Image (cartoon, rainbow, N blue to C red):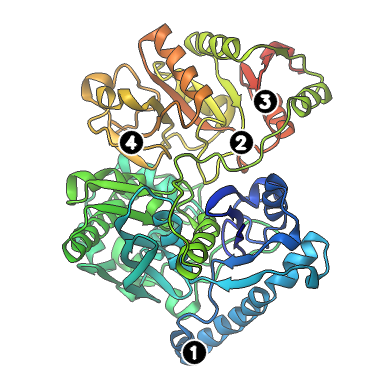
């Protein structure tokens, strides 16, 4: 038996994953336990969960795979450090990180409460983008695929591409510091007055409200040529001031990445969320997105031309841009696509583990990630206790009745907290920690925002659809099991599902098969039986915090917000039974 613990630490969305004999057993982000969004610490609690889930003792871990390689691109790091004062400051911070990464085995032992000599494992450092690529390719259904990872920076690199063949990934090229599409997107996101780590998602939603009127200007901000790109550096400042993420016991933050050149080109920045969002801001968001699409789709066409392959694996933070992803089939020759649910940094724990399994230990392929449910689940007893502790009275029903009763309530307009089984890995709730609602109701988006989510009105909610019915409701039907593709809703259907349809007539859909999530599939089917619509509106089970992990957190969110019904496993709780 070979047991590999994958770890993403000291980077956004710290996480752990456990692979035993090539099978993924558990994977989870640290933020789900610590409740700190995008937690960047060493993922002690995630590690503990993974080991407990598999019944593995610390001494039984054979390999620890970290998704960072402090020795990768060393020449580049040294050159950057020697360049100027900013470079030296960055280097000092990196040296601190290097120390922490090299001490990971000791840190792991400390967290597990065992002497380090009890750990027999071998530690491996996997370059960040190789870990990203491995996180997609090695768990994909493909024996052969073109692979591409794009993000901010990891180990000095912002994009890497190559080919996956059987058990081997071959790197063909990369883009290095200071040029980065992730930095490009984040910098303009900050310029538009969205300063928080992870706000890019909001700006992607905002983009649909504007027109891409600034393409000439944006082609100067980021220039591209086939698979390569570079930034017009006068619009940025990270190359002189650094782009290092900082955290201080809270969520990570990035310094401002846009430079004076961006204001000279596009006008004054929106300095805070209190300033109104004008047409100009919406048009800039639209152009930011349009230019990203031009560059990424151009890279993909070139990648196809260079490899001749028709299957594609994507990874990295930019692979969460579901609008770009949804255009791949129309605008590139690729005919098949795989993106792992945790395409962002959280997924690199899985990637590092599989990189060691295949590339270093030469083990044959034999696993495909077809669902995202790799986190903790909790017993019926624990759920009952959570309800008791909150003074709620639940009714325990057989599964078929839970499904039927929930479908009835949804069809009548109820907002339902749907808490079932194992927690999702990755940023999206996919039917185990979801808030569900009737997609047919025009006012449902506003109602959800007013009662529960309290978020910007331009951010869309997502449709979940029975996979086999996708083509009836959307103009494309390639499966999107992890809510990572946006497709146009068929024009004749828009009026039938207005709530999860974005202003531009698209939906960021999740397609659901019964073998991926039986109870969720049955619920959507039951809703379809009642209404003729095989779609539910799905948003994550949280208010403004990491997705609920435990039953207590779900109950707390239910009590705090104005949901109508909670399906906590087989326990059904009506709103009326909640204390005021
Ligand atoms: Fe990354």
Determine the secondary structure under disc 2: loop
Distance from the alpha carbon under mark 3 to that under mark 4: 31 Å
Distance from the alpha carbon under mark 1 to that under mark 4: 45 Å
> Mark 3 against mark 2, which lies toward the viewer?
2
Q: Toward which corner of the image does residue 235 lie, by quadrant? A: bottom left
Determine the secondary structure under disc 1: helix
Badge 1 or badge 4: first in the primary sequence: 1
Q: Can you identify the residue that label 4 sits on?
A: 479
Q: Toward which corner of the image does residue 487 lie, by quadrant? A: top left
Q: Can you identify the residue that label 3 sits on?
A: 558
Determine the secondary structure under disc 3: helix
Badge 1 or badge 2: first in the primary sequence: 1
Residue at left 29%, top 67%?
221
Give the image location of residue 258, x and y in percent: 42, 67
Residue at left 36%, top 55%?
314
Would residue 7 be visible to someone looking at this image? yes
């Amino acid at each position: 038996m070979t047991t590999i613990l994958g770890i993403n630490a000291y980077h956004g969305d710290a996480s752990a994953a456990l692979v035993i004999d090539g099978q993924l057993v558990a994977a989870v982000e640290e933020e789900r336990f610590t409740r700190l969004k995008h937690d960047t610490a060493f993922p002690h609690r995630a590690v503990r969960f993974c080991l407990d889930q598999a019944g593995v003792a610390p001494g039984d871990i054979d390999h620890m795979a970290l998704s960072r390689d402090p020795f990768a691109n060393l020449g580049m790091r040294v050159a950057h450090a020697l360049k100027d004062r900013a470079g030296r400051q960055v280097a000092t911070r990196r040296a601190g990180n290097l120390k922490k990464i090299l001490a990971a085995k000791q840190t792991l032992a400390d967290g597990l409460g065992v002497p380090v000599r009890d750990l027999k494992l071998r530690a491996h450092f996997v370059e960040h983008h190789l870990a990203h690529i491995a996180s997609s390719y090695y768990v994909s259904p493909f024996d052969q695929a073109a692979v591409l990872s794009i993000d901010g920076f990891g180990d000095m690199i912002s994009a890497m591409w190559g080919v996956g063949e059987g058990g081997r990934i071959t790197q063909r090229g990369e883009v290095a510091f200071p040029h980065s599409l992730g930095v490009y997107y984040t910098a303009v996101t900050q310029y538009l007055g969205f300063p928080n780590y992870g706000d890019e998602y909001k700006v992607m939603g905002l983009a649909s409200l504007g027109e891409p009127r600034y393409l000439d200007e944006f082609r100067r901000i980021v220039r591209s040529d086939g698979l390569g790109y570079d930034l017009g550096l006068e619009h940025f400042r990270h190359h002189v001031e650094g782009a290092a993420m900082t955290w201080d016991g809270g969520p990570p933050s990035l310094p401002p990445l846009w430079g004076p050149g961006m204001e000279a080109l596009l006008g004054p920045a929106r300095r805070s969320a209190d300033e109104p969002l004008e047409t100009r801001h919406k048009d800039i968001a639209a152009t930011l997105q349009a230019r990203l699409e031009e560059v990424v789709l151009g890279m993909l066409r070139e990648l196809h031309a260079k490899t001749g392959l028709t299957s594609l694996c994507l990874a990295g933070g930019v692979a969460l841009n579901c609008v770009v992803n949804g255009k791949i089939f129309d605008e590139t020759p690729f005919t098949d696509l795989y993106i792992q649910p945790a395409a962002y940094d959280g997924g690199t724990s899985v990637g590092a583990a599989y990189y060691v399994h295949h590339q270093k230990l030469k083990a044959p392929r034999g696993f495909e990630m077809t669902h995202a449910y790799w986190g903790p689940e909790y017993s019926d007893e624990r759920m009952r206790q959570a309800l008791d502790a909150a003074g709620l009275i639940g009714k325990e029903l057989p599964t078929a009745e839970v499904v039927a009763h929930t479908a009835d309530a949804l069809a009548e307009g109820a907002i339902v907290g749907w808490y079932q089984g194992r927690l999702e890995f990755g940023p999206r709730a996919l039917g185990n920690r979801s808030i569900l609602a009737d997609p047919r109701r025009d006012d449902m988006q506003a109602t959800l925002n007013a009662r529960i989510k309290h978020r910007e009105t331009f951010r869309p909610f997502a449709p979940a659809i029975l996979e086999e019915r996708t083509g009836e409701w959307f103009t494309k039907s390639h499966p999107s099991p992890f809510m990572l593709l946006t497709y146009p809703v068929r024009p004749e259907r828009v009026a039938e599902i207005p709530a999860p349809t974005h202003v531009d007539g698209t939906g960021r859909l999740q397609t659901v098969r019964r073998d991926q999530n039986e109870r969720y599939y049955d619920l959507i089917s039951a809703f379809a039986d009642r209404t003729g619509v095989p779609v539910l509106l799905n948003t994550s089970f949280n208010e403004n915090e990491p997705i609920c992990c435990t039953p207590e957190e779900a109950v707390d969110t239910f009590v705090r917000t104005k949901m109508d019904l909670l399906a906590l496993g087989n326990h059904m709780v009506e709103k009326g039974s909640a204390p005021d």
